[in-house]
Structure formats: C-alpha cells, structure tokens
Image: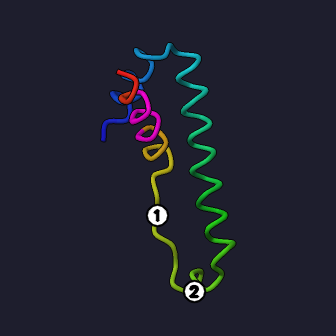
C-alpha cells in the first residue's frame, strides 16, 4: 500500500484539515484496539504479538468510508 497515495486520495475528497483529523482519530482507534485486546487476553502475551501497521490500517478504514460516499 502506498500510504502517500491513499492519503492524497482522502485529502482530495475531504480537504486537508478534515483528512488529517479523521486519519488521526482512526490511528488512535487502531492503537487503542490493539492495546485493549492485549489487556483482555493476558495469555496471548506469552506467544508474542503480530506486528501491525496501525497507520496503514487507519488509512484503509478512512479510505473505505470515503469510497462509500462516492
């Protein structure tokens, strides 16, 4: 995934300020979801965690919502 291209597409649809705000909120949600799932399942810590691209996931989610409106 080309993060810059996805962000440009979001900015083109929403404007810079709104795009940055929504992607930031989605990014924070991704982080919280990851941390809460780790707290909820302490046994999983023993096996290690899968590395996630939180920014990529956030961009995908915002982009999906933007695509629904077109």
Q: Residue at x 52, y 78 (%)?
A: 48
Identity of the residue drawn at 40% across and 33% down: 63
Q: Is residue 19 left or right of residue 39?
A: left
Q: Position of residue 61 (x, y in %)?
A: 45, 41
Residue 19 included in the magenta stretch of the image: no
Does 41 appear above or below 13? below
Residue sitting farthest toward the front:
69
Distance from disc 2 to disc 1, alpha carbons, whole Å, reads 15 Å
Q: Position of residue 16 (x, y in %)?
A: 52, 15
Which residue lies under the disc numbered 2? 46
Number of marks in the image?
2
Secondary structure of the residue carrying numbered label 2: helix
The quarter of the image holding the C terminus is: top left
Q: Is residue 61 part of the magenta span, yes or no?
A: yes
Instruction: Report the residue at 50% width, 50% height from top.
Output: 54
> Counting other residues with Cα less than 10 Å from the Cα at mark 2, is it few (<14), some (14-19), or many (20 or more)?
few
Q: Main secondary structure of the magenta part?
A: helix
Determine whether, in the image, residue 12 is placed left or right of residue 38. Answer: left
As displayed, is residue 2 above or below residue 54?
Answer: above
In the figure, 58 relative to 47: above or below?
Answer: above
Task: Say which element carries label 1.
Answer: loop
Question: Residue 41 lies in what quarter of the image?
Answer: bottom right
Q: Which residue is mark 1?
A: 51
- Image: magenta residue range: 60-66
In this picture the colour scheme is rainbow
């Amino acid at each position: 995934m080309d993060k810059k291209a996805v962000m440009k597409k979001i900015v083109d649809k929403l404007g810079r300020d709104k795009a940055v705000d929504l992607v930031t909120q989605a990014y924070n949600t991704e982080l919280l979801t990851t941390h809460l799932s780790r707290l909820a399942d302490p046994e999983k810590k023993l096996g290690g965690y899968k590395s996630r691209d939180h920014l990529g996931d956030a961009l995908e989610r915002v982009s999906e919502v933007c695509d629904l409106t077109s």
